[in-house]
Image: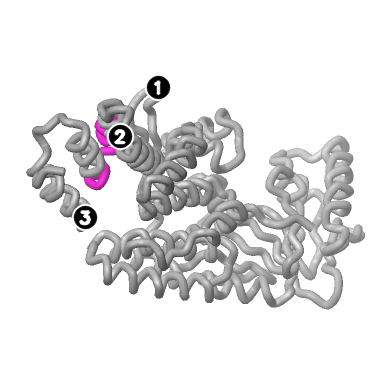
Amino acid sequence: MDSLIAAAARALALGDPLAALKRVGLRSDPPALALRGIAMAQLGEHARARELLRRAARGFGPREALARARCVVAEAEVALALRDFRGAPRALAAASVTLEALGDRANALYARLVAVRRLLLLGRLEEATCDLARLDARELPPVLQTVAELTAAELALRALCTGRAREALARAREAAERAHVPALAAEVAEAHALLERPAARRIDTGHAQLLRLEEVAALVASGALVVDACRRGVRVGDRWQALTRRPVPFALARALAEAWPGDVDRNALILRVFATRRPNESHRARLRVEIGRLRNLLAPLARIDATALGFRLTPAGERSVVVLAPPFDDDQASLLALLADGAAWSTSALALALGASQRTIQRALVELESAGRVRSIGRARARRWLSPSLTGAATILLLPAALPST
């Protein structure tokens, strides 16, 4: 390794891409191309970074398997930044095995960490948690240890384990101080601030109250019947009934929960759930069918009683009923929460992360764009969607999460 390559690599390790480009910006040999790609990625020029890394990987000879594997890992992280999930994770896993076999343990662990972060973005939390548990963050350099602890903190937050998240963030702060990389320290500080922002609204007996993540966790642990409009389901303690793919039963459950301990008029339910101005017998028949479906879904958690006026939700046992709503009212709250990270998402990546059809996501994005709430860059297949950050609110509860079923 010549002195310029070594100096550029040290600059990149310290988070100084401009210093690295001063040394290798005009060179086109494979090691220089790889370092230029990493520098461009640190500067946010991800498309250019991917091109340079691919050129570098093609330039390395058959005996340079270590360098090619490093390029695969770097390109996988760039794809993650681009929110491009089309690449097969097998290539990343193979690169990790190659790096481990050739003695580059730090980059092998880093490849596995990139795979964990990919699972996290896709909402596959159980897989991400298991894979992260197999990594020993203490074996990582300070920079990678910070990333690993930040990942652990986000996994804990999505599971509403705020105590575990604070412990992971404390370890991340300590590692970031040892790494001496300002961008990492800023990311840790932002994660700490997330804990103090409103994450949801508690709605019961007609009153609304903003809650932080720790207060949401306390509410869930209280044993109340929670109709969760953030993750679209009904929860009592550890028991969870998902209604994500059942919009009408969920809308009925929320309407009944907001009226608890009172009942809701049948016509009022029809107007709210079926979005019609003139209820008729067909709407009333459909309401009876949907109420029956909701009764079956909630049977272990609550019952729905018919009254002279309409219907009433009655939780099992002496429990209160609470609606947990997003901190802001929006039909596309989860979509906006994903875009709020500041990254540019493709339509296919958003559909994959949210478990929805690409056409559904496209329609929602068109509506949001016409309202000026999102913007797009590029055209056709290269089109990407961005949104300004949702300042003052934590969106962690709106992100994809694999919740247990009853």
Q: CA distance from mark 1 to mark 3?
A: 34 Å
Which mark is first along the chain, 3 or 1? 3
Residue drawn at x 62%, y 71% is 207
Residue drawn at x 51%, y 31% is 362
Q: Could you tell me the amino acid type at mark 1?
A: Ala
Q: Quadrant of the C terminus?
A: bottom right
Give the label on residue 64, or none: 2
Q: Residues within 10 Å of mark 1 (few under 14, many from 20)?
A: few
Question: Of 363 and 267, which appears nearest the observer?
Answer: 363
Q: Mark 2 falls on what kind of element?
A: loop
Q: CA distance from mark 1 to mark 2?
A: 37 Å
Q: Residue furthest top?
A: 380
Range covered by the magenta-colored residues = 41-52
Q: Could you tell me the amino acid type at mark 2?
A: Glu
Residue drawn at x 88%, y 45% is 288
Q: Mark 1 falls on what kind of element?
A: helix
Question: Of 2 and 74, which appears nearest the observer?
Answer: 2
Q: Quadrant of residue 209?
A: bottom right
Give the label on residue 380, or none: 1
Q: Which residue is mark 3?
A: 15
Question: Of 376 and 179, which appears nearest the observer?
Answer: 179
